[in-house]
Image (cartoon, rainbow, N blue to C red):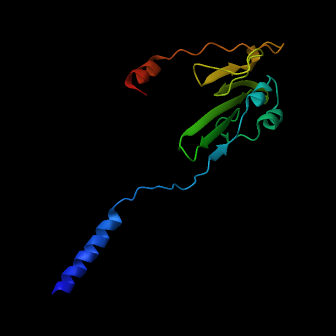
Amino acid sequence: MIFPRFAIATIALCMFSACSSVPRIVKEYRIDVQQGNVLTQEMVSQLRPGLSRDQVRFILGTPVLMDMFHVNRWDYFYSLQKGRSGEVETRRFSVFFDADGKLVRVSGDVAPAQPTDTTVVSETRNREIDLGSLPADGSTVMPPPDERGFFGKMMESVGF
């Protein structure tokens, strides 16, 4: 009579111990996952209005997204997930062409560098730059950040 009780108690104890969590003393190694195109400041600074699609592809690489509904727009995305912390860094960059296939403007997280600055500090991450309005002598001036519209202010007040 004692053996069945002991066996049931042992089986129940084993089943309950399988559900418990054990604190991890040693964590496994997780690698950094990098996806998309890596765009550096030097690459973006080489862009000039009037460059052909082949020249832009040579400078920036093959775009991640060439949408058939927006044939004059190429999108470059970059994502880096840190293995140890799990934080994700994302960047977006778009290149726009005219009907002849010449570069007109760019927009995104990466901005062309100022000739006097070694680092670019911006209040907003996403800016659109019309390359046709840049001076020909190479001195670039960043446009003022866009003001939020009605829906942007509403979404900001809600917390998005």
Compared to residue 40, the image places residue 83 above or below, namely below
- In this view, the residue farthest toward the left is 1
Image point (66%, 14%), residue name: 143
Decide if residue 42 is in sight here: yes
| For residue 2, side relative to residue 155 (left or right) | left
The percent coordinates of residue 112 (x first, y second) are 73, 22
Q: Quadrant of residue 104?
A: top right
Decide if residue 99 is in sight here: no
Q: In terms of depth relative to the viewer, which is nearer, 8 or 97?
A: 8
Compared to residue 18, the image places residue 9 above or below, namely below
The percent coordinates of residue 105 (x first, y second) are 71, 23
Image point (71%, 28%), residue name: 96
Image point (37%, 59%), residue name: 21
Compared to residue 66, the image places residue 101 above or below, namely above
Look at the image and tell me in which quarter the C terminus lies. Answer: top left
Q: In terms of depth relative to the viewer, which is nearer, 86 or 97?
A: 86
The percent coordinates of residue 66 (x first, y second) are 68, 40
| For residue 157, side relative to residue 39 (left or right) | left
The percent coordinates of residue 13 (x first, y second) are 27, 71
